[in-house]
Image (tube, rainbow, N blue to C red):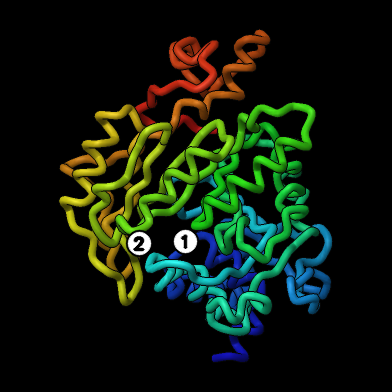
Amino acid sequence: MAAALADLGEAAKVAALENLGDSDRAFRIATSWLEGGRACGRHRAVGFVGGAIGVDGTPRVRPRKGSDALSDKSGIEWTDATWNPVTGCSKVSPGCAHCYAETLSLRFGWSARPWLPANAAMNVVLHPERLDQPTRWRRPRRVFVNSMSDLFHELVPDSFVFEVFDRMAKADWHSFQVLTKRPERMASALRAYYARRSARAPLPNVWLGTSIENDRWAGRADALRKTPATIRFVSAEPLLGPLPSLDLREIDWLIVGGESGNAARPMGAGWALDLRDRALSTGTAFFFKQWGGRTPKAGGRLLDGRTWDEMPSVLLHREVEAQVLGRPIDSVPSDLVRENLGKRKPRRWIGVPVEA
């Protein structure tokens, strides 16, 4: 098995990223690609040579020049694509216990050891060769940054975080979604980042979020509120308990979901319904991702008899600019654009996703 996984290489990686959290399916897709000599799913496979930087100073593998280390399609319902300028992480709270990224990394050999703090120097890897990848995607899309890591891990230097944000500023036709369990580090790093820029306003195309799995960690939202951001969001996934202390003030978007995998911990229906009701009362866009179970889709996506796919309305920032400049926009209804003209930080939400 180990030899087979090694042979799969990046084919397995791309397949895994196509449907995060379902490593059995990823392995089957990658195996079928290897045996059939064809592209893996909707993505092309790539090879490896040495070159990426480990935070412990040791060499790491990286894709050959010209290969695409992003996934331009994602199985995550609230994003369109993934971009991983950093890979590897270490666990900080109960939501990390059954981390899908760790499972995939260990199964396919991208990490040498479990994602414990003691192993972080081996597992956290910087990929400077991937920094410019989003600029090569010309069609606008929502991009989840570091689906396989945490950009604000303590071993990722501020200088590299700044480079990631510089690329997001450059690729301003995309909307970038950055999610962390280390919001205190994010707040301090971004205050330093904006202090060195001539334009001090937060990047309009970057959404910043934090994960909160139980009430003990509800204070992460307080750190998020101190972070300069155009969009702030909370991901309550995996939701492991009720969140009575969660304050949704200045939170634009709330994602709720249950855990998936063989050892998935069940989510209480009342926990999700309470968060839905509070989001509605505060004008926070609400997205119900999944009930969870053995696979991400095992329990379905219906909550109280319907799906909840709300997105923050600032997603329209590029379309609003186009309207102001008189350029045509094909994908956004004009009435939604007019509703958002001149609103720097709208508190409304749009009930259906608007494709970027």
Q: How would you rate the neighbour count of disc 2 (Cα within 10 Å): few for under 14, some for 14-19, many for 20 or more?
A: many
- Residue 339: x and y in percent read 45, 12
Amino acid at pointer 2: Pro
Q: Please tell me which residue is depicted at 71% across the width and 43% down the height of the picture.
A: 192
Q: Measured along the vertical axis of the image, is residue 344 above or below residue 229? A: above
Tell me if label 2 and label 1 are in contact, CB under 8 Å.
Answer: yes
Residue that label 1 marks: 19
Viewer-nearest residue: 319 or 230: 230
Q: Residues within 10 Å of mark 1 (few under 14, many from 20)?
A: some
Residue visible at 33% across and 49% down in the picture:
256
* 142 left or right of 219 in image: right
Which of the 4 quarters of the picture holds residue 119? bottom right
Q: Which mark is residue 34?
A: none
Number of marks = 2
> From this viewpoint, is residue 137 visible?
no
Residue at 71% over, 36% down: 194
Check disc 1 and give the amino acid type: Asn
Residue at x-position 56% and y-position 48%: 178
Quadrant location of the C terminus in the rendered image? top right
Label disc, if present, on residue 296 of the rendered structure: 2
Image-based side of 87 in relation to 248, left or right:
right
Residue 232 in view: yes
Where does the image place residue 37, in percent across and percent down from the top left?
A: 65, 73
Q: Nearer the viewer, residue 26 or 174?
A: 174
Of the residues under marks 2 and 1, which one precedes in the sequence? 1
166 or 52, which lies in front?
Answer: 166
State how far apart marks 2 and 1 are (Cα). Answer: 9 Å
Q: Quadrant of the N terminus?
A: bottom right
Secondary structure state at the residue bearing disc 2: loop
